[in-house]
Image (cartoon, grey):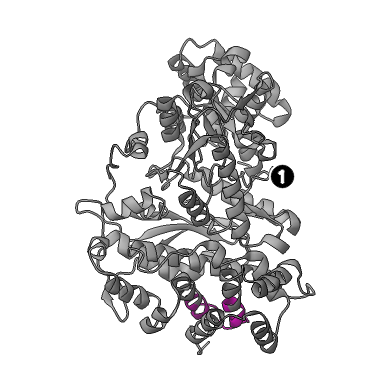
């Protein structure tokens, strides 16, 4: 299957819906109406939907499918570049490689403040882990490989990437604004649909699957929301309703899941088999040159079906006619699985999200993980990675990196092995024992599976305790385990301000695990952190502005700089994860205080000497606390590298 075709077919139903939307008017949500909005995250796809009934029902539901994935419903789809101002992915490796979290934070903040200014109260729902039935595994792998190929073919200024720490940055904004948010145990798509149907409110997302779910309140594509047009407390947008398919095409709503499966459902994981067979039965071709005619013929045939059951029978007949029984059986199962996902919009899979938001019900933890861990995942303090570990499979998506070099996640593998050990040792009795965790990770330009052995013992500490045991310990004991994992002196950690401890742990680990042939200016990392932490001071702000607006000669090894910046972010990411798993014995930092892609890239491109860095420090770090932090960071850096 061609990755290009895969991505295109996935959007066919979306394109049809968008064409129909031209027959709809633009709805205006007025400030005087107290609209309640539910938002759900999706790491790779993002959509925004608003119901035309919002005025009467006073509710607005925003859906964002989220990552184990690093995306959200406000994030644009990486496959398609849009200059709409809502993208949390970044383009232009010369300026945005690796994450400008202050800009990400400001975009997220502006979006939600615009909703709040219109009396729209958003609720955000993120994806948790990947579904353990692997319905979308093939789709995820295909997308990863497609993006690698696409970015490699683009000129540098058009490359795009998701910042590694965007999830932490996003959720911190939500917490500061007091916006309710949670993460599901698994994929959030149909859980959002259930909530939207219960609340009879619209969904904001950019996931094309939302066109298929029968949402009474409607669906708003995030690309249809223009924040620069928010005036006088009004938010203008475009509403999509599943009923429009029936009104304009004559296709009953109940047949939309079947049509989506034919066109290329991500849940069916069917590679084109169904579409090709179906179109061949019609006497047509499956090439994109004939897609309009094929769509018309497909809708005509499905429209003749009196029910979803009869439509499925038509599909099954196509499969039986064209495939041997050995292949037909498996394909039929995937077709039924695809349709069932779209139909599962009447009850929640794990816990009642609506009651959870309203504080009327605690989430029922149906996973083997202890409650203390599941609650961290539900509250978005922790990603869904521990859930993936319990089923023995973790997906590590590639970013913008040098594809001939090892993946950036390679440097943090020892940390992940400890995470695997902590999680698997803490699983409830009676669950299936996992000996190895299969990591699906990049190997050059392909995604491969690698078995990884969990680590259950740490030098200088001993056997790892369970997460339940850690939850009952005091902060001092948690810190002892934390410093043992990172081979860090406890007394040195105590000397650092709370905002810098995670940064110091990650930086120390990064330097210890970086190949000797890589030239590092250790002072630059320390100085950049001080700049980010104290950038509001005039002297520091002038240095930040200077470094953020100019670069060096461009003759340096740019690929090396880029890769190291990505690897350092990965170390920060895993350090954050371990810290939260241990009960957050040290403060979780805001990503904008520990990393800035433009600042660090430009600083490294200048190739400053030690004397130049020392002079910048003396000139711009005028406050005592700044110099104290800078010197403390230099003191904790390993000297044997």
User: Residue 579 appears in which quarter of the rendering?
Assistant: bottom left
Magenta stretch holds residue 517: yes
Residue at 52 percent of width and 37 percent of height:
266
Q: Position of residue 342 (x, y in %)?
A: 45, 28
Q: Position of residue 133 (x, y in %)?
A: 38, 42
Q: Position of residue 5 (x, y in %)?
A: 65, 38
In this figure, what is the number of numbered marks? 1
Q: Position of residue 439 (x, y in %)?
A: 44, 58
> Position of 48 compared to 381: left or right?
right
Q: Residue extending furthest left?
A: 429
> Position of 80 compared to 390: left or right?
right
- Secondary structure beneath dot 1 equals loop
**Taking the image as drawn, is residue 329 in sight?**
no
**Taking the image as drawn, is residue 111 in sight?**
yes
Viewport quadrant of the N terminus: top right
- For label 1, the residue is 83
Q: Nearer the viewer, residue 327 or 95?
A: 95
> Position of 217 compared to 579: left or right?
right
Residue at 61 percent of width and 23 percent of height:
279
Query: How busy is the neighbourhood of tag 1: few (under 14 within 10 Å), some, or many (20 plus)?
Result: few
User: Residue 619 appears in which quarter of the rendering?
Assistant: bottom right
Q: Nearer the viewer, residue 14 or 136?
A: 14
Residue at 20 percent of width and 51 percent of height:
430
Query: Magenta segment, which residues?
Result: 508-526
Magenta stretch holds residue 593: no
Q: Height in image: 310 above or below 42?
A: above
Q: Nearer the viewer, residue 265 or 62?
A: 62
Residue at 60 percent of width and 78 percent of height:
527
Q: Height in image: 601 above or below 220?
A: below
Q: Height in image: 314 above or below 105?
A: above
């Amino acid at each position: 299957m061609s990755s290009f075709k895969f991505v295109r077919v996935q959007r066919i139903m979306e394109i049809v819906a968008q064409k129909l939307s031209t027959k709809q008017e633009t709805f205006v949500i007025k400030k005087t109406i107290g609209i309640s909005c539910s938002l759900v995250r999706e790491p790779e796809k993002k959509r925004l939907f608003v119901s035309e009934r919002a005025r009467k029902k006073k509710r607005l539901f925003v859906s964002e499918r989220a990552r184990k994935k690093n995306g959200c419903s406000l994030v644009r789809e990486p496959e398609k570049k849009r200059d709409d101002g809502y993208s949390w992915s970044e383009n232009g490796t010369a300026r945005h490689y690796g994450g400008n979290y202050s800009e990400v934070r400001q975009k997220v903040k502006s979006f939600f403040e615009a909703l709040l200014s219109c009396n729209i109260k958003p609720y955000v729902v993120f994806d948790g882990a990947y579904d353990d039935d692997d319905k979308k595994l093939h789709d995820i792998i295909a997308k990863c490989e497609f993006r690698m190929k696409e970015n490699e073919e683009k000129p540098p200024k058009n490359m795009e990437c998701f910042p590694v720490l965007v999830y932490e940055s996003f959720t911190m904004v939500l917490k500061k604004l007091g916006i309710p948010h949670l993460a599901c145990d698994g994929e959030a798509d149909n859980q959002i649909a259930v909530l939207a149907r219960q609340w009879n409110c619209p969904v904001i997302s950019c996931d094309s699957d939302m066109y298929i779910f029968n949402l009474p309140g409607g669906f708003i594509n995030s690309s249809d929301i223009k924040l620069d047009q928010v005036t006088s407390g009004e938010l203008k947008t475009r509403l999509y309703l599943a009923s429009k398919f029936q009104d304009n095409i004559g296709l009953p709503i109940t047949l939309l899941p079947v049509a989506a499966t034919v066109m290329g459902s991500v849940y069916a994981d069917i590679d084109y088999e169904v579409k090709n067979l179906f179109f061949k039965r019609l006497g047509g071709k499956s090439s994109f040159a004939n897609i309009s005619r094929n769509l018309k013929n497909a809708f005509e045939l499905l429209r003749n079906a009196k029910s979803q059951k009869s439509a499925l029978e038509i599909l099954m007949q196509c499969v039986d006619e064209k495939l041997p029984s050995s292949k037909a059986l498996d394909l039929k199962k995937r077709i039924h699985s695809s349709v069932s996902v779209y139909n599962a919009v009447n009850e929640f899979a794990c816990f009642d999200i609506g009651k959870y938001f309203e504080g009327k019900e605690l989430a029922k933890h149906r996973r083997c993980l202890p409650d203390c861990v599941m609650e961290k995942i539900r509250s978005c303090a922790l990603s869904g990675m521990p859930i993936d570990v319990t089923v023995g499979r973790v997906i590590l998506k590639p970013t913008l990196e040098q594809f001939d070099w090892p993946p950036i996640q390679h440097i943090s593998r020892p940390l992940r092995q400890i995470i695997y050990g902590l999680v698997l040792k803490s699983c409830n009795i009676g669950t299936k024992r996992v000996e190895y965790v299969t990591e699906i990770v990049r190997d050059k330009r392909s995604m491969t599976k690698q078995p990884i052995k969990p680590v259950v013992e740490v030098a200088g500490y001993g056997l790892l305790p369970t997460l339940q045991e850690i939850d009952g310990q005091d902060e001092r004991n948690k810190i002892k385990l934390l410093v043992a994992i990172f081979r860090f002196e406890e007394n040195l950690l105590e000397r650092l301000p709370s905002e810098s401890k995670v940064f110091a742990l990650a930086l120390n680990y990064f330097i210890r695990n970086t190949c000797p042939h890589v030239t590092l200016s250790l002072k630059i990392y320390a100085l950049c952190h001080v700049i980010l932490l104290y950038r509001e001071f005039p002297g520091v702000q002038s240095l930040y502005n200077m470094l953020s607006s100019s670069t060096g000669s461009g003759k340096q090894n740019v690929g090396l700089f880029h890769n190291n910046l990505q690897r350092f972010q990965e170390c920060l990411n895993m350090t954050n994860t371990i810290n939260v798993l241990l009960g957050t014995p040290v403060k979780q930092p805001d990503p904008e205080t520990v990393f800035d892609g433009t600042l660090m890239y430009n600083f490294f491109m200048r190739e400053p000497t030690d004397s130049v860095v020392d002079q910048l420090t003396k000139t711009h770090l005028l406050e005592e606390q700044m110099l104290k932090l800078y010197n403390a960071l230099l003191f904790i850096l390993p000297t044997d590298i």
